[in-house]
Amino acid sequence: MAGVKSLMKDTAIYGLSSIVGRFLNWMLVPLYTNVFAAQDYGVVTFVYSVVALAMVILTYGMETGFFRFANHERWKDPMEVYSTCLISLAVSSALFMVLVAVFVGPVTVWMECDGHPSYVLMMAACVALDAFLALPFGYLRYARRPFRFAIVRLVNIGLNIGLNLFFILLCPWLMEKAPSTVDWFYRPDFGIGYIFLANLIASAVNLLMMIPELRGFRWRFNPVLWREILAYSAPLLVLGIAGIMNQTIDKILYPHLVPDSARAMYELGIYGANYKIAVILLVFLQAFRFAYEPFIFSRNKEDGAGKMQAYRDAMKYFVVFALFIFLGVMFYLDIIRYFISPAYFSGLAVVPVVMLAELFFGIFFNLSVWYKLIDRTVWGMWFSLLGLAVTIVLNVVLVPVIGYMGCAVGALCSYGTMMVASYFVGLRKYPIGYPVGRILAYFGFAALLYAAGVYGVGALGAGDIVAGLLRAVLLVVFVLVFVRREGISLKALAGPLASKLRRR
């Protein structure tokens, strides 16, 4: 249990940067959806979908490879592993930037940025910088320095958001009131390009802030170690590509599945804006992932049944927290929806489907512990390819019929398939003994509360305040049932907090 407490503590700290950052980025959605037309926001959605895929390719599993080999019994010097991985990422990121610069013309056309090659060059530079910096951030996680990790992330996020507000709100106002202050650098027709420029400046500042993690050790490249890391990480690369394509392929394919290009980008803008509402659950998944990978590899060194129980507890607590977040978002969607412009409300129906899909993916990530610990990451590749196949087939079949709802259904079926496949194969290869019955019981109970909170309370015709209070009661009931069922003592949980307050 102590290990799980440590995991939850690190998750909370990593989550600070993720939750605050995602929330603040989330707060930009109403800005984008009110300033830019849905078609322009569709281009932003498309570009960032391609960027997400490029990031996975350019990091090619080096993060997880570093965690594995820094804790490997055959390689005694973690800094040699770190240095080898850093050099590899530096070279590959530089080559990527050169290739994009050489072929910027056709890439600009393919990325729906016709007439704006600067958009592509800026985002390529962002990807190259962020891919390289993925390992220094990984080193902070390995060194158990979550506070430093969170500070650098928050500065990056704050700068990005501040620049967005500067370019999109302040500069147009100054152009109207005092044009001489900004007309020497600000171009109103640059439009969504300022979103990308803000991202690039923030990434460059990130590089400067991470200089301490790039010094203090001898840079050396071990080709034998590098080949072993690549062999370990290659399936993770395929897994990562398939995984990110499961998240982005619907947005990348959408313009090709809808015959009218203008309509496609408009609908993609609607879908992308509503997808952002599900970001609350994605934040929790990301924060959990940051803490979970170092946790599982460090626990693997232990003997006995303790580590298995830690994996079981981590899965159970993850599912319960994720269900709580799901219920909270769905109960108060009538309020949360105003984070996007009312012009985008037509896509709200995708929110519960996307959130449930992300929950399934989180469970799949938890299940991935078995093939990572026995160095059979190839299984992750097969599961992800299976999910990708499901995504592509369902998008091709459903999008022409039901539009972007087909994207959401495809994601749900894809992650559900991956989750089930990983669980049953893991039963044979590395049985952990997850409390499936109890987890399914929590799912069932959450489903009942969902029906009661969304449909039951709605049918009562109560006012907004009364309906909100009733739904809050249902959330409290969910927590109390969990606490009672797991034998968690509220007094024991409050003890450390009370002790700290007394010391103050």
Image (cartoon, rainbow, N blue to C red):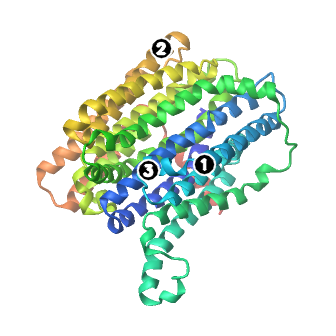
Q: CA distance from mark 2 to mark 3?
A: 43 Å
* Quadrant in the picture for the C terminus: bottom right
Of pointers 3 and 1, the one earlier in the residue sequence: 1
Number of the label disc, if any, that sits on residue 102: 1
Q: Which mark is residue 109?
A: 3
> Can you say whether 109 is above or below 241 in the image?
below
Q: Residue at x 71, y 46 (%)?
A: 136
Judged by depth in the image, the label closer to the viewer, 2 or 1, is 1
The label nearer to you, 2 versus 3, is 3
Please report contact status of discs 2 and 1: CB closer than 8 Å, yes or no.
no
Instruction: Give the numbered dot on residue 466.
Output: none
Q: Residue at x 57, y 19 (%)?
A: 378
Task: Report the amino acid beneath label 2.
Answer: Val
Q: Which x, y percent locates residue 263?
A: 25, 51
Residue at 27 percent of width and 35 percent of height: 447
Residue at image point 69% right, 28% down: 68
- Residue 119 visible to an observer of this rendering: yes
- Say which amino acid is labelled 3: Val
Q: Is residue 175 left or right of residue 205?
A: left
Say what amino acid the circle numbered 1 marks: Val
User: Whole-percent x and y of residue 117?
Assistant: 51, 57
Q: Report the residue marked by disc 2.
A: 425
| Secondary structure at numbered mark 2 | helix
Left or right: residue 329 versus residue 294 is left
Q: Position of residue 10 (x, y in %)?
A: 61, 44
Quadrant housing residue 343 = bottom left
Tell which circle, 2 or 1, labels the residue nearer the N-terminal end: 1
